[in-house]
DNA sequence: GCTCGCAATGTTATACAATCACACTGAGGG
DNA sequence: CCCTCAGTGTGATTGTATAACATTGCGAGC
């Protein structure tokens, strides 16, 4: 997981910059804790309730630093003594997605912790088809050809899904 | 289904241009037959086998002119006397997607006939959250912010998913 | 003709993803 | 104290996708 959290530009409040420094393993424990603390603060500030289940799911996604399916999350919840039926995981994920702590990767039907939560952004993702690593970047939906087509036809864009599939740097090297 | 097959630019071999003319209902029977004939020709030319099941699935998607789930397709296949187990539909869809006759809409887990098959293109879609209409436009993956981020990090883009969700013109009017 | 290889299809079963329906709890607010 | 309501736990169900294996049908070569 060498190339996570890369972004093309400086972005507000990146969760884990150390990940950029290549093979140098970053202080991930600290990175997770910082993100959790920040999330707690933001929830308190905005009157959101980061309950134990939700907090656990977010912690897990931050920990893994890659996309996890709902049932993988569910398994982990079971092991931690939480409820183990699908709705438990999906409700927590709904909350986290709605409030921008987590994104859904449509291509994988899986979820990943946001790399710069708090910022109002339209995420774009790069997904390695070989090692399943996922990196978050920014997209600009209204600009570009799609925006032009939307304006031309009167379509009102509310949300965009932008996901690129391919080979990450380290998998490219191996090939 | 007023605004289907719109594209921001002229494109090669559009399946059904009439759809552009607003409320004027186009000659859909002819539009489907033309697309099927073209597909058959291209398959013959490239040594692909447009078998009965595959042909039927393509015909259905052209007919509907919107995104259909795999099991909706499966139901129709059953009624036509084809096999009715999931793999029957999925194999046909795999073939059609691989050869560019059909696209998958990741956001909907559904499939839609390509608006300009034969052209080597990266599709982008506009999906109305109210009436489920889907329109195909072109995207330019390598250009724009995502392409820049990819180049910056050494990610090799092989395929892109670009899907915008929002309100189509006619649903916007009603609101 | 016969058999081999191969692609497509059929069938069973199962894994993975998402939602519905309902009961229970526990923290506020009258 | 009771009520409300958001969050949670649980069972059941529906939808999406694949695994694994048997069968069919057709052309190439013997
Ligand atoms: Zn990290
Ligand atoms: Zn990789
Ligand atoms: Zn048409
Ligand atoms: Zn609409």
Image (spheres, coloured by chain):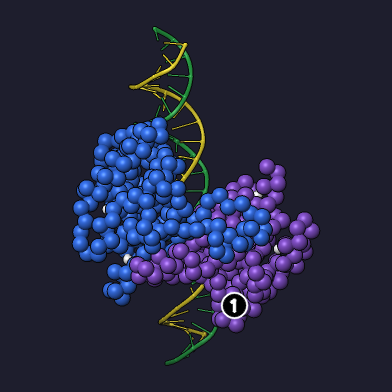
Chain colours: A blue, B purple, C yellow, D green
Q: Which chain letter goes with mark 1?
A: B
> Could you tell me residue B144's position as x and y percent?
48, 66
> Could you tell me residue C8's position as x and y percent?
53, 70
- Where is mark 1, residue-wise? B43
- Is residue C22 left or right of B68 when viewed as pictured? left
Question: Dot 1: few (<14), some (14–19), or many (≥20) neighbours within 10 Å?
Answer: some
The N terminus of chain B - image quarter: bottom right
Q: Residue at coordinates 31% horizontally, 34% vertically from top-left? A: A52
Question: Can residue A98 be seen?
Answer: yes
Q: Is mark 1 within 8 Å of ligand 3?
A: no
The C terminus of chain B - image quarter: top right
- Is residue B112 left or right of A170 when viewed as pictured? right
Q: Residue at coordinates 22% horizontally, 51% vertically from top-left? A: A28
Question: Can residue B89 be seen?
Answer: no
Instruction: Count up the numbered dots.
Output: 1
The residue closer to the viewer here, B153 or A171, is B153
> Could you tell me residue D11's position as x and y percent?
40, 33
Disc 1 secondary structure class: helix
- Is residue B8 left or right of A63 when viewed as pictured? right
> Could you tell me residue B22's position as x and y percent?
75, 58
Q: Residue at coordinates 70% horizontally, 46% vertically from top-left? A: B173
Q: Residue at coordinates 46% horizontally, 64% vertically from top-left? A: B145
């Amino acid at each position: 997981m060498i190339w996570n959290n890369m972004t093309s530009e400086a972005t507000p409040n990146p969760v884990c910059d150390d990940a950029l420094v290549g093979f140098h393993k970053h202080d991930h424990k600290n990175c997770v804790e910082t993100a959790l603390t920040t999330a707690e603060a933001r929830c308190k500030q905005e009157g959101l309730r980061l309950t134990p289940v939700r907090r656990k799911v977010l912690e897990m996604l931050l920990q893994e630093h890659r996309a996890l399916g709902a049932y993988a999350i569910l398994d982990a919840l079971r092991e931690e003594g939480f409820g183990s039926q699908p709705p438990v995981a999906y409700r927590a994920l709904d909350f986290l997605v709605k409030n921008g702590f987590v994104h859904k990767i449509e291509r994988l039907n899986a979820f990943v912790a946001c790399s710069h939560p708090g910022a109002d952004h339209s995420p774009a993702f790069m997904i390695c088809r070989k090692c399943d690593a996922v990196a978050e970047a920014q997209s600009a939906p209204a600009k570009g050809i799609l925006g032009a087509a939307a304006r031309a036809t009167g379509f009102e864009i509310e949300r965009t899904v932008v996901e690129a599939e391919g080979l990450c740097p380290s998998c490219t090297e191996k090939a």
